[in-house]
Image (tube, rainbow, N blue to C red):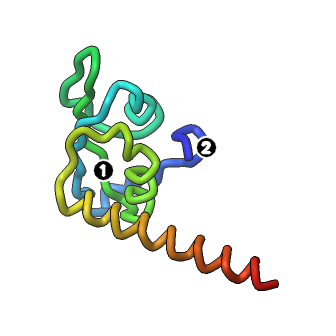
Amino acid sequence: LHGSEHSFPTRRSSDLPAPSMLTLTISSNARWICEDFECTLISEDAETITCSLPIWNEEWILALLCDISADIIECPSEWMQRVSDYAQSAMEIWEEARMIRSEA
């Protein structure tokens, strides 16, 4: 997963409610998030970036957070637990598929 390979879900209609926001502090290695996706830059220095991403699609955000997990410096604990559960689920699916393939 890398930002330019996936489109970020955006919604511009005034009829839709505003999305909730997720504020993250990430290492400068994950700067591409701010360049590729709709977000609000809160602060930046040579090593870290703090930004807020709109949450239009929670599964997409979980996949993004999993992708950049090594670069996350600060993230709300609720989201870190959700990423952990998401990654654990993916590992279980991969292990199950591997076992099925090895039995074939």
Q: Amino acid at mark 1?
A: Pro
Q: Amino acid at mark 2?
A: Glu
Q: Is residue 85 left or right of residue 63?
A: left
For the residues marked 2 and 1, what is the alpha-carbon distance in whole angstroms? 19 Å
Percent x, y for residue 84?
A: 34, 63
Marks 2/1 in contact by CB < 8 Å: the verdict is no
For label 2, the SS is helix
Residue 31 vs residue 56, the one in the foreground:
31
For label 1, the SS is strand
The image shows residue 57, relative to residue 3, as above or below, that is below
The disc, 2 or 1, on the residue closer to the chain's N-terminal end is 2
Query: What residue is disc 1 on?
Result: 54
Residue 31 vs residue 17, the one in the foreground:
31
* Rendered residue at 17%/57% (across/down): 77
Percent x, y for residue 53?
A: 30, 45
Percent x, y for residue 95?
A: 58, 74
Q: Residues within 10 Å of mark 2 (few under 14, many from 20)?
A: few
Q: Residues within 10 Å of mark 1 (few under 14, many from 20)?
A: many
* Rendered residue at 46%/48% (across/down): 67
Query: What residue is disc 2 on?
Result: 5
